[in-house]
Image (cartoon, rainbow, N blue to C red):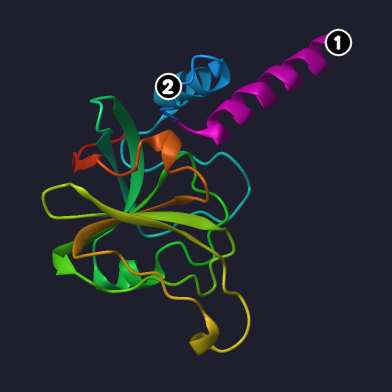
Amino acid sequence: MVDRLTTTLTRAGLLLALVVGAACSSDPSDATTETAAAATTAAAPTTTAAPTTTGVQPVGFTTTAATVTAADGEVCEVCLWVAATADQRSRGLMGVTDLGGADGMAFVYDAPSTGQFWMRNTPTPLSIAFYAADGSFVSAADMEPCLTGPDADCARYAAAGPYTTAIEVPAGNLDELLMAPGSTLALLNTSCP
C-alpha cells in the first residue's frame, strides 16, 4: 500500500511539474520553476505539446520553439502553439482550458496588422504581448474572458502599433517569460525541445 501511494505521489509531482510549464523567471528562490522547466524540456514531444491534464487543448495547430530575449540579454526558451492561417487565428484559444505543456499561442501574420483581439468563448483569462516584424516588443495587455452576452459587449484589445506576431499566455505569465518592454521575440520554426 505504501509503495502504491509513493508511486502515485511521484507521478502527481511529475504531472505538476509538467503542468507548471517552462518558466524563465530568474528568481533564484524559485527552484520549483527551474525543476518544472527541466521536466518540461525532457518530456516535450517533437511536433505538438504533450497532454498534461484532462482539459480542452488546442486542436488543429502545431507547435514551435521560440526565444524571448529580455532587454538585459537574458534568454527564455518557450514552446508555442502556432495560429498562422486566418481560420486558426479566428479560433485561437476559444474553448481551450489546457495548453498541453506549451507556454502559449503565437498568432502569426504575413504583413503588419493593427487588428484587435477579443476573448469571445475563451474561458481562461489571458495576457497578450504584441511583437513587430523585426521581433521588437510593441505592447501588452491583460484580457478577461467574454463568455456571455452579445459580441458587441466583449472588450477589444489593441496593440500600441503594428505587429506581426501576438503571443497569448495564461494571465500574469508575460513577465516570467520575459515578454516585456525592450524584449525581442524569435520564432524558430523548429520542434519544441
Residue ID at (45%, 62%): 93
Residue 85 belongs to magenta span: no
10 Å neighbourhood of mark 2: few (<14), some, or many (≥20)? some
Quadrant of res 139: bottom left
Label 1 vs 2, first from the N-terminus: 1
Q: Position of residue 64 (x, y in %)?
A: 27, 42
Residue sticking out furthest to the right: 1
Disc 1 to disc 2, C-alpha distance = 37 Å
Q: Nearer the viewer, mark 1 or mark 2?
A: 2
* Mark linked to residue 26: 2
Type of amino acid under label 2? Ser
In the structure shown, which secondary structural element does the residue marked by tag 1 occupy? helix
Q: Where's the N terminus, which quadrant?
A: top right
Magenta span = 1-22
Type of amino acid under label 1? Val
Quadrant of res 3: top right
* Nearer to us in this view, 118 or 88: 118
10 Å neighbourhood of mark 1: few (<14), some, or many (≥20)? few
Residue ID at (61%, 29%): 15
In the structure shown, which secondary structural element does the residue marked by tag 2 occupy? loop
Residue sticking out furthest to the top: 3
Q: In this view, does 188 lie to the left or right of 123?
A: left
User: Is residue 173 positioned above or below 92 on the image?
Assistant: above
Residue ID at (49%, 76%): 155
User: Is residue 34 positioned above or below 138 on the image?
Assistant: above
Q: Where is residue 144 in the image (x, y as percent from the top left)?
A: 55, 65
Q: Position of residue 44 (x, y in %)?
A: 40, 30
Q: Where's the C terminus, which quadrant?
A: top left
Name the dominant secondary structure of the magenta segment: helix
* Nearer to us in this view, 41 or 27: 27
Q: Name the residue under label 1.
A: 2
